[in-house]
Each structure stands twice: as structure tokens, then as C-alpha cells.
Image (cartoon, grey):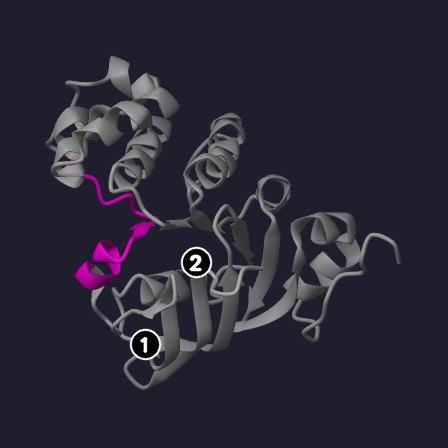
Amino acid sequence: MSEVPLFECRGVEAGYGRVNVVRPFDLAADAGTVVAVLGPNGAGKTTLLSTMAGLLPRQGGSVLVAGHELRSGRAAAASRAGLVLVPDDRSLFAPLSVRDNLRAAAGRRRRAMDDVLDLFPALRERWRLQAAALSGGEQQMLAVARALVQQPKVLLVDEMSMGLAPMIVEHLLPIMRRIADENRAVVVLVEQHVGLALEVADEALVMVHGEVALRGTAADLLRDQAALEGAYLGGEPSEPAPADA
């Protein structure tokens, strides 16, 4: 871990009004790291990502990018700081073409569009097609591509596999690894396909009822299925057994 993590959460609490959903949450990740955030439905994962991205005001704690604290509830400021969210509903401009969706996000960063299209060549073939006419997998590619043309330092991806066939998920998830490695970004990935997510992640944690029930390296969690299953069932917060245990 470097002296100043590229992305950090310190005691972040999240919720809606007076309703607390996520208890104090801590995370520190260096450039080039993929963090998998796992857990059952209703664990608070989407609320956490929305709060990180400034779509919801924090109930407590701090979110920092490259050591600079982001203002609570300020999504535009978070984006300017280099933190970009791919939401679970994709939030595409459905009537616009692939080209216009990307141009709207890229602004003056037109060169970034070529790099993104190299990552998702299928979008070149759909360049003038409306986003609404794309398949589910193509829409997800476009949602991620639209985030990437903004050249994020921190990419938050919420349930990328939602509604997609397993074959498509197996193709898309390794791209998260490439994004972290090639762009030196932090990728925080909320995902229900546990095994696939752990295969591409460096670190992982399991959230249950708004708290971290299990945390460790992705390799250790993948190896310790008993600890993983126990966390999903609401066991006490713990760490997986290390590889040499």
C-alpha cells in the first residue's frame, strides 16, 4: 500500500434521511486495484456506491481520491475529482446513438473514445444505432465505455451482470481487470457472480446488513468457501484463512 491510497473511505456511513443503511465502512486501495464488494440483496452495497459517488449525502465519514476529500452529496464534484459510477440501471441516453452517448460523456476527450472502442470493438459495429436498440450486453458495454471516456481514477461498477447471460458476464468481468491494470485505476465492483468477481479482484469484502462480515484478499476468499458461505449467512465479522494456514 502506498503512503496515500488512490481511493479511501474512512468511517463512511450511508442511508436515507434518518435511516442508517451502512455502518462505518473503511477501505483503502492503491492504483491498479480491483476491489469486489459482495453480499446478499439488501446488504447496502448500492447505497454505499451511490454515497461514494456523491449521489447520496454521507451520514458520516470521509471519501478521498488521491488524498483529497470529496464533498458529501456532490456528484459533479466527485466526477471532476476522477470518481465515476456505472449504475445498476446503466442510465444510458436511450434515444441517442452509441456515438452520441460516448461524445456526451467524453466532452473534449475525443482521443479517449478510440481507446475505449478498442476495448469494446462490438460498439464500433453499433456506432450509429440507438442505445435502446442494443442488446443487454451491448448496453452494459456502452455504460462502462461511457464511464471510461471520462478517464476515471476510480471506477465504481454496480451490478454489471444484472440481467445478462453468464456467457456475457464471463466476457465483461475480465475487462475490469484490464481497466485497473492498463489505466492504473481503482475499480470497485459490486457483483452477484461471486466466483467470477473473485477471479478478477485483488481484494474482496462481504457486506451483510450494512456491515462488513468478511474481508481479505480475493484469492483467500475464493479458497475459503466455508468462510464465504458463513459471511453470506450473517456470521460474525472475520477474515478468511490465509493461504499458508
Disc 1, SS = loop
Q: Amino acid at mark 2?
A: Leu
- Residue 61 is covered by the magenta coloring: no
Which disc is residue 234 wearing? none
Residue 118 position in % (x across, y down): 35, 20
Residue visible at 36% across and 82% down? 19
The circle drawn on residue 58 is 1
Picture quarter with the C terminus: bottom right
Q: Residue furthest toward the right?
A: 245
Residue 229 in view, yes or no: yes
Q: Quick one: 36 or 192, which is closer to the camera?
A: 36
| Residue at 45 percent of width and 48 percent of height | 187
Q: Earlier in the sequence, mark 2 or mark 1?
A: 2
CA–CA distance in space, label 2 to label 1: 20 Å
Placement of 143 over or under 233, stated as above or below = above
Q: Which residues are magenta?
A: 76-94
Residue 136 in picture, x, y percent from top left: 34, 30
Q: Secondary structure at mark 2?
A: loop
Q: Position of residue 174 (x, y in %)?
A: 52, 33
The amino acid sitting under disc 1 is Arg
Image side of residue 110 versus residue 90, left or right: left
Mark 2 neighbour class, 10 Å CA radius: few under 14, some 14 to 19, many 20 or more: many
Q: Quadrant of residue 22?
A: bottom left
Q: What is the residue that sits farthest to the top in this orientation?
A: 125
Residue depicted at x 38% and y 61%? 66
Residue 90 included in the magenta stretch of the image: yes
Quadrant location of the N terminus in the rendered image: bottom right
- Residue at 30%, 61% (x, y): give it: 53
